[in-house]
Image (cartoon, rainbow, N blue to C red):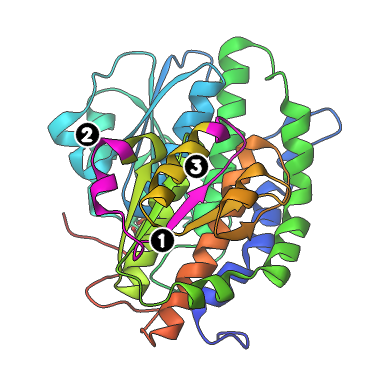
Amino acid sequence: GKGGYDHFMLKEIHEQPTALAQAIEGRVDSETPAIRLEDFRNGTFDGVENVQLVACGTSYHAALYGSLALNRAGVRATALLANEYSASSPPIDDGTLVIAVTQSGETADTLNALRRANADGARTLTVTNVVGSTAARTADDALFIRAGPEIGVAATKTFSSQVVMLLLLAQRITDDARGEPAADLDALLSELRRMPDRLDALLSWSDAEAIARRYDGSQSYFFIGRGLGFSVALEGALKFKEITYGHAEGFASGELKHGPLALVTPETPVFAVFTGREDEKTLKNAEEAQTRGAPIVAVCPDGHRAVDVADAHLEIPETHPALAGLFANVQLQLVSYHAASLLDRPIDKPRNLAKSVTVE
Ligand code: F6R
């Protein structure tokens, strides 16, 4: 059942602290510090020179987040839409690892990309929630996110768990490929260990509902961010359109001035995601929208300079820059949920959508 919540989506949003604790259980040792993922059939990742992450929808946003983490750790990585893969896949060679990111493990587009990567001789791995899924059986190796079943059509807890597993995997791949752990691994792991408690706290003090009320009835909703914040902006907008049916778009902050700014009016609130990297630039981009009358909602820690500039604030805790986007995403999940709830939408089963898309 829904465990006392009105919708599975809200229940699953609140399950995120537990889901993350399960994801890292036994896999993170913040003392050493070390990451202990399961043994992969194909051994270590020491021959891996480039990584292609393939996925759709929310899983694609997690893949984008993961690709940046890999790049920052020094491994060439690209996130690709699985449904574009056959039309535009980059070349595969001996050093290529293809990672299929899929909650259900049954998404036709993602399975097609995975099969093609197998056929082209790439080493393959899936990051999935479902043990025994087609993806788990098709890839050379599987890494399970252990988020537990997700019933709501809109993916929530599985996004967070996918991102955390990709962050761990990125460390593991770079460690194997370079023979030494990343410089700030201990900082990342100790923040990761604290994350379930801090998420629990955020879920109790979040004022996302008040923000949803305040901007209810707007014409369009824009989400902007840079780097990891860009993937969160895309995910924030996808969730918003899926369950509210309102128009929402996610943009890279710096892209606003290259076109989308023409859409900005006092009727288009802009949610600006700050993840602690190049925040000044994102703030400047947000102010460009504000000058055109758009209300700005800053998603950032208390005391951040964006708070003084913005019209509204969605608070996230101070944390490791690799994790800030996850907290921001949870706040945006709540905004979408409450906005949809005000509109009385069928939140767990939005029109025209299915939980698992098994057709191409
Ligand atoms: C969005 C959503 C979809 C899925 C996509 C991929 O809330 O749920 O965009 O993320 O259909 O599904 P999986 O991860 O099962 O491959």
The mark nearer the N terminus, 1 or 2, is 2
In the image, what residue type sits under mark 1?
A: Pro
Residue with the mark numbered 3? 229
The numbered disc on residue 244 is none
Foreground tag (2 vs 3): 3
Say what secondary structure mark 2 lies in: helix
Residue at image point 38% right, 65% down: 240
Which span of residues is magenta-colored?
257-280
Q: Nearer the viewer, residue 308 or 174?
A: 308
In the image, what residue type sits under mark 2?
A: Arg
Residue 39 percent coordinates (x, y) = 60, 33
The numbered disc on residue 269 is 1
- Per the image, is 272 magenta? yes
The mark nearer the N terminus, 2 or 3, is 2
- Per the image, is 240 magenta? no
Q: Outermost residue, right direction?
A: 31
Q: Do we see residue 127 in this rendering?
A: no
The residues bearing labels 2 and 3 have C-alpha atoms spaced at a distance of 31 Å
Residue 268 percent coordinates (x, y) = 35, 61
Residue with the mark numbered 2? 116
Q: Quadrant of the N terminus?
A: bottom right
Residue 72 percent coordinates (x, y) = 54, 22
